[in-house]
Image (tube, rainbow, N blue to C red):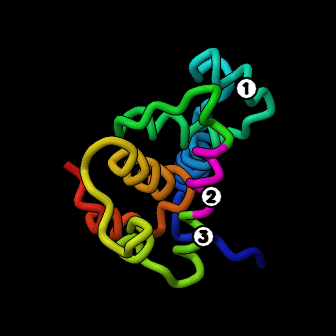
Amino acid sequence: MPVRSAVPRSVRSTAVAVAFVAVLGACTEEQPGLTDLPPDVARARPTISAEEARFVLVARERGAFVTGATVDDDIETGTTVCWALQNGASLREIAVDGAGRPLGNDGEQLRTKQLMAAAVDALCPDYDDQVAQLDLP
């Protein structure tokens, strides 16, 4: 004798449909690509990944403008920041100048901190609680 579910069939069907839509929504989230980037960045790095493109766009939002001339070094900075965090360093420890002093909030020092924050946002968000250590303006 078959066992009957206590949950009506229409409720089960609705639950399955809702779950399917949620999974589909997560899979179809828009990822940035070449057409979303400044033209000079797209020309300089035509094989940029969606993750790297997101980093470039987040850096811009944070005030660090990635250009075609800087894109390779900037992405390397971002991936290095995440590597250091994943290996136990903190942003406070790595956001220092050659003399071990915290980076300032102007010029290239500020840009470096903005790139570090963008790296965390776009490439290694598990460390977002450390962005405040950068003391960005």
What is the number of callouts on the image? Answer: 3
Residue at the image point whose x is 68% and y is 41% from the top: 72
Label 1, secondary structure: give it. Answer: helix
| Placement of 110 over or under 83, stated as above or below | above
Q: Mark 3 near mark 2, Cβ–Cβ under 8 Å?
A: no
| Viewer-closest of 104 and 31 | 104
Report the amino acid beneath label 2: Thr
Q: Is residue 99 magenta?
A: no
Report the amino acid beneath label 3: Ser
Q: Which of marks 1 and 3 is nearer the N terminus?
A: 3
Q: Give the quadrant of residue 131.
A: bottom left
Residue at the image point whose x is 53% and y is 58% from the top: 8
Mark 1: few/some/many CA within 10 Å (<14, 14-19, 20+): some
Residue at the image point whose x is 33% and y is 48% from the top: 110
Report the amino acid beneath label 1: Ala
Q: Name the residue under label 1.
A: 44
- Is label 1 or label 3 in front? 1
- Residue 9 appears anywhere in the view: no
Q: In which quarter of the image is the N terminus?
A: bottom right
- Magenta segment: 73-80
